[in-house]
Amino acid sequence: MRLLASSPEGVTDYIDADLRDPDRILTEAAKTLDLTQPIAGTVLGVLIFIPDDEEASSIMKRLRDALPSGSHLALTSTANAIHGERTDEAVRVWNESGSAPMVVRSTELITSFFDGMEILDPGLGPLSRRRRDPSAIGTAPEVDEFAAVARKP
Ligand SMILES: C[S@@+](CC[C@H](N)C(=O)[O-])C[C@H]1O[C@@H](n2cnc3c(N)ncnc32)[C@H](O)[C@@H]1O
């Protein structure tokens, strides 16, 4: 609740919405955000719960299209490019648990979620090794949760 407290420096709001309804998310967000100015958007650890690739792509297109020029988008999504079958097995066990099922996606498909945007250095890769200060990466192991930040031209 503390994070929801707006102040003269900035306004905070919370929307209880399903990612499958991006129009509603955008309509509600526009009550707080000025969508004529560049914004920073995040889709972190949630697109994995939209198992249908076409639906995931359609949602991301809708969100990207709504971003004003100069906006940034950060996205994380699970791949299996590093650990292959070990990640597939971990996801299989997760999906047996009764939780919302998640999907593993190819790095090509994850990259396509940024279509029309410029993916910033160091590009799409393991979240554990994406730091603003490269010297802070240290010996962080490579994980199959992939991440990138992109800018809309
Ligand atoms: C791994 S957590 C990530 C949370 C947060 N984005 C973060 O990075 O800390 C996944 C979240 O996605 C939410 N979620 C799952 N399916 C969703 C959907 N269809 N629409 C909106 N949120 C969803 C879950 O309730 C959970 O809070």
Image (cartoon, helix red, strand yellow):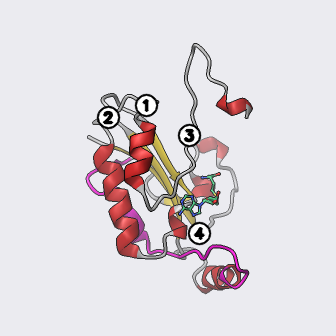
**Cα distance, mark 4 to mark 2?**
29 Å
Residue 116 is inside the magenta segment: yes
Front of the two marks 4 and 2:
2
The answer to whether the residue labelled 4 contacts the one labelled 2, judged by CB atoms less than 8 Å apart, is no
Front of the two marks 3 and 2:
2
Residue drawn at (64%, 49%) of the image: 137
Mark 3 Cα within 10 Å, few/some/many (few <14, many 20+)? few
Front of the two marks 1 and 3:
1
Residue under label 4 = 144
Front of the two marks 4 and 3:
4
- Quadrant of residue 98 within the rendered picture: bottom right
- Mark 4 vs 1, N-terminal side: 1
Which residues are the magenta region? 95-119
The answer to whether the residue labelled 3 contacts the one labelled 2, judged by CB atoms less than 8 Å apart, is no
Residue under label 3 = 132
Give the residue type at disc 1.
Answer: Leu
Above or below 138: residue 57:
below
Nearest to the observer: residue 57 or residue 11: 11
Residue drawn at (58%, 45%) of the image: 131
Task: Locate residue 145, reporting x and y percent.
Answer: 58, 64
Residue under label 1 = 33
Give the residue type at disc 2.
Answer: Gly
Mark 1 Cα within 10 Å, few/some/many (few <14, many 20+)? some
Residue drawn at (28%, 48%) of the image: 65
